[in-house]
Image (cartoon, rainbow, N blue to C red):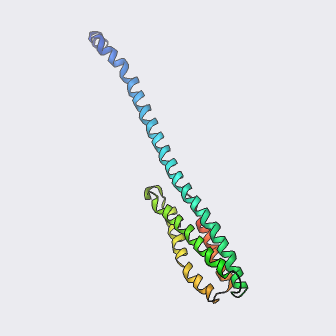
Amino acid sequence: MKEILHRLPMRFKFALVLVLPLIALGWFAASGAIARQAAVNELSRMQALTALAQQAGGWVHQVQRERGMTAGFLGSQGKVFGDRLRQQRSDTDAAAEAFFQQRDQLDATLLTSTISSQLAAVEQQWQQNQSLRDQVDLLSVATPEALGHYTGLNPALFMRPT
């Protein structure tokens, strides 16, 4: 073996000495690039979910306002808060629409199955809202039941990314 190495031209010996460090350098460069790409992907996911959370926060605020006005409307047997409640419903609907638009802009690959199911639950609960509003307008729903609907919607909007 020693004799074979002595017969090799100097350029081959030089190449042999450089091959292992170059392979190691390539490995470290590739693994570093992969790690940075994973970080970029996670940051993109968090940015998208943060934007959605901002819309959810605005919606929760409007839902809480509608909840309070609904309580006042039902408590007064429809004598007060009628006009303000109608306006608040419009504001709540606008906040819900902004949330759903933000959700629709999300890249589905950024969502875990847990978040996707939470979003579906929020939408399902929101679809029951018009029926509740109709019952409130007719004063045919108990105040605790009406308020429970709004109270139940809020935790659904506080999604926890996993």
The quadrant in which the N terminus is found is: top left
The quadrant in which the C terminus is found is: bottom right
Q: Quadrant of residue 15?
A: top left
* Residue shown at 55% from the left, 56% from the top: 51
Q: Where residue 98 sits: x, y (%)? A: 53, 64
Relative to 109, residue 24 above or below: above
* Residue shown at 51% from the left, 54% from the top: 48
Q: Where residue 39 sits: x, y (%)? A: 50, 44
Relative depth, front residue between 14 and 123: 123
User: Which residue is farthest front?
Assistant: 83
Q: Where residue 66 sits: x, y (%)? A: 65, 74
Relative depth, front residue between 87 and 33: 87
Q: In the rendered picture of this protein, how many numbered marks are placed on residues?
A: 0
* Residue shown at 27% from the left, 11% from the top: 9
Q: Where residue 56 sits: x, y (%)? A: 58, 63
Q: Is residue 5 visible in the rendered structure shown here?
A: no
Q: Quadrant of residue 87?
A: bottom right
Relative to 17, residue 146 above or below: below
Q: Quadrant of residue 147?
A: bottom right
* Residue shown at 56% from the left, 55% from the top: 50
Horizontal side, residue 14 vs residue 148: left or right = left
Horizontal side, residue 141 vs residue 43: left or right = right
Horizontal side, residue 19 vs residue 96: left or right = left
Q: Is residue 84 visible in the rendered structure shown here?
A: yes
Relative to 110, residue 138 above or below: below
